[in-house]
Amino acid sequence: MDIKSKLWIEVEGEPVFGRGRRFLLQAIDQYGSINQAAKEISISYRKAWSYIKAMEERLGIKLVERQAGGKNGGGAVLTKDAREFLKKYEQMEEGIREIIDEKFRRIFYR
Amino acid sequence: MDIKSKLWIEVEGEPVFGRGRRFLLQAIDQYGSINQAAKEISISYRKAWSYIKAMEERLGIKLVERQAGGKNGGGAVLTKDAREFLKKYEQMEEGIREIIDEKFRRIFYR
DNA sequence: ATGCGCTATGCATAAAAGTCATAACGGAGA
DNA sequence: TCTCCGTTATGACTTTTATGCATAGCGCAT
């Protein structure tokens, strides 16, 4: 028996940011390409693209600067806003998992 | 922008208990009927029934004692095991929401 | 006997998620 | 200049999951 938790941010009742999207942005930052990032975190390009589109629409912020064609076929980089948002979200998650796990052990397996 | 969180328990990777199921069991306890409970928390009887079935199968514990037919058409009551489980889960949720909300405000709206 | 409100469940429908196919872009190298 | 490559960008289809509908059976009370 395991405890699980999710943490996400909504705008007008629609999810805009969570763990999966965090992974995606981090991977884009690392690999410089949506395509490569998607492969790395094992989701389809289509899905990654939809995530980004939805995030940007709902937050009203440009998160990923894209280029189709050109050197290496193009690529994508995070905007400054994206980095700031990411940082805040990381702080948000920090420590929460531990609190929950500890509580679970204490209550269910004391 | 709001922060949301979910907390649930899994057995072998399958969810067995979360907030929705907690509401359901509490409502059954209160109303003495799956049907009435489902109406009260605005889900279909079908869904409530599926929840209970899955929970019982995965936990391997009988949670709800049911009777079809009889006085008042029958009804349902929680088993002792269900009450114990419910109590533990309630303790589990307690305080976590507050921690998350506080953290969210501090980080995103400081 | 009949009615009532309940449990029980198969089946159809709807919604969501995932997959596939295709187009366009623009630098690099032949 | 022209083709190739890896990328972004989407529409359309398929598969899976969730939801809702319809119907049957139960047993007390009247």
Image (cartoon, coloured by chain):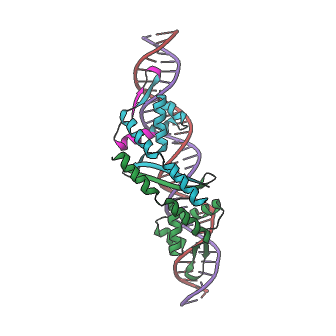
Chain colours: A cyan, B green, C red, D purple
Specify whether A101 is left or right of D26.
left
Q: Is residue A11 above or below residue C21?
A: below
Q: Position of residue C8 (x, y in %)?
A: 62, 68
Q: Is residue B17 magenta?
A: no
Q: Position of residue A93 (x, y in %)?
A: 46, 46
Q: Is residue A100 visible?
A: yes
Q: Residue at x 64, y 52 (%)?
A: B12
The image quadrant where one finds the C terminus of chain A is bottom right
Q: Is residue D18 above or below residue A47?
A: below
Q: Residue at x 63, y 61 (%)?
A: B59
Specify whether A9 is left or right of B19.
left
The residue lying toward the viewer, choosing from C9 and A63, is A63
Specify whether B53 is left or right of D3.
right
Q: Is residue B83 above or below residue A55?
A: below
The image quadrant where one finds the N terminus of chain A is bottom right
Q: Which stretch appears magenta? A: A50-72
The residue lying toward the viewer, choosing from D19 and A26, is A26
The residue lying toward the viewer, choosing from D26 and A62, is A62
